[in-house]
Image: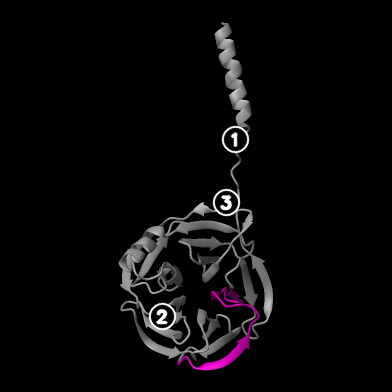
Amino acid sequence: MKPLLIIGVLSCLVACNNGPEPVADPNAPKPMGYSIINTFPHDTSSYTQGLLFYKGEMYEGTGNYGFSKLMKMDWKTGKPTQQISLDSKFFGEGVTILNDTVYQLTYKEKVVFAYTLKDLKKVKEFPVEIEGWGLTNDGKHLIATNGGSDLYFYDPSTFKLVKTQTVNESSTAAYNLNELEYVNGFIYANQYESPYILKIDPNSGQVLAKADVSSTWDRIKKMYPTIHSNDLVPNGLAYDSVSKKMYMTGKKWPELYEVQFSQ
């Protein structure tokens, strides 16, 4: 019986040394799977900064100095049906449409453009204190990112800051929040230079779910091995409230995808 006693004591010592089992973080985002439903062409010259649907029509904003545009797209062919070019001193960023007005951020120029929906005619410019990255709206506020961990809520008529909401993944501030899409009370965000799409509760700032699109991004990088991966990052999320379908693409990607997320 003594050898058994010794083994039992040793087992107890090993278990005690290992300490208590780690407690799962209740705020950790759930994994969010995705499926590609359909594939459509996308212009590989488009350095996609903003993507959206409005009343069943797709719009896209692109970046880079001298190449920035705002376009209404035939998303089934990947061709613009209407477009304007920004002055070469502006680097276009996120776009959104609220109450038939198109808004487009600029990168470091700290100005926001407002256009008419019908003819994409610029009718106003607003100063903004942040570096512009992503832009969406919740039907009341314009919501922007500056590449950090915060969501900035603006009054659309004045572009005055209403509030700031920090986004947290588990108990840590998120980072590199980029292109945004507001969908049924949640915000989906590309995380710049990463394969992740975050599903965010805009009221609490908590990341609820997280999709990893590495497999799609890797496929694109293999198609263009000579292009720097930073020029091929996933960036572009659009929800068509008419068809209830979600789309994603990336900077200079040759394809636009209709996708379905699991969360």
Q: Which of 38 and 65 is in front in this view?
A: 65
Question: Where residue 80 sits: x, y (%)?
Answer: 36, 85
Question: Where residue 33 sits: x, y (%)?
Answer: 43, 55
Q: Earlier in the sequence, mark 1 or mark 3?
A: 1
Q: Which of marks 2 and 1 is nearer the N terminus?
A: 1
Query: What secondary structure is marked by label 1?
Result: loop
Whole-number angstrom distance, CA of label 2 to CA of label 1: 52 Å
Whole-number angstrom distance, CA of label 1 to CA of label 3: 17 Å
4 lies left or right of 212: right
Q: Mark 2 points at which residue?
A: 57
Placement of 196 over or under 155, stated as above or below? above
Q: Mark 1 points at which residue?
A: 21
**Residue located farthest toward the top when viewing the structure as drawn:** 1
Give the foreground label among 2 and 1.
1
Q: Is residue 129 magenta?
A: yes
Q: What residue type is labelled 3?
A: Ala
Q: Residue at x 53, y 61 (%)?
A: 199
Circles 1 and 3: CB distance less than 8 Å? no
**Mark seen at residue 28:** 3
Q: What residue type is labelled 1?
A: Glu
Circles 2 and 1: CB distance less than 8 Å? no
Q: How crowded is mark 2: few (under 14 residues within 10 Å), some or many (20 or more)?
A: few
Q: Which amino acid does label 2 sit on?
A: Glu
218 lies left or right of 95: left
Q: Residue at x 47, y 81 (%)?
A: 64
Quadrant containing the N terminus is top right
The quadrant holding residue 231 is bottom left
Query: What secondary structure is marked by label 2?
Result: strand
Q: Which residue is drawn at 31% across and 79% down?
A: 77
Q: What is the magenta range? A: 119-144
